[in-house]
Image: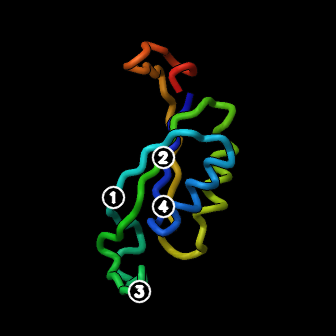
Amino acid sequence: MKKIIAIIKPFKLEEVREALAAVGVTGLTVTDVKGFGRQKGHTELYRGAEYLVDFLPKVRVEVIVTADKVDSIIEAVIASARTGKIGDGKIFVQSVQQVVRIRTGETNEAAI
């Protein structure tokens, strides 16, 4: 099992969610985050306002899936989140050792 973390621009969240649903992802976690990368110091237009890139608003999307779905999910996120501009985001893939559903006690792939 793998945990996929995607840091994307907030206005791309709906497109990414729809792309993940099309690939078969049923559950995900979304968190508001702020950050900057190497592009610190320039201005960017976001929702009609100019921001100095100190801490831009971003969204962190987390999904836990079986290992066979990782490539299709990464491709779906890239295709739906890409704008071609600075700060499109990043995708991280981590291994997950064990998953336990609290309510039923199911483990691993059955718990997903």
At 56% from the left and 54% from the top, the residue drawn is: 17
Residue 92 shows which numbered tag? none
Which is more N-terminal, label 3 or label 4? 4
The residue at which mark 4 appears reads as 8
Which is more N-terminal, label 3 or label 2? 2
At 43% from the left and 19% from the top, the residue drawn is: 100
Residue type, label 4: Ile
The residue at which mark 3 appears reads as 48
Residue type, label 2: Ile
Tell me if mark 1 has few (under 14), some (14-19) or many (20+) residues whose alpha carbon lies within 10 angstroms of its own.
Answer: some
Which mark's residue is nearer the viewer, 3 or 1? Answer: 3
Residue 109: image location, x then y, percent: 57, 21
Residue 18: image location, x then y, percent: 61, 55
Residue type, label 3: Gly
Tell me if mark 3 has few (under 14), some (14-19) or many (20+) residues whose alpha carbon lies within 10 angstroms of its own.
Answer: few
Which is more N-terminal, label 1 or label 3? 1
The residue at which mark 1 appears reads as 33
The residue at which mark 2 appears reads as 5
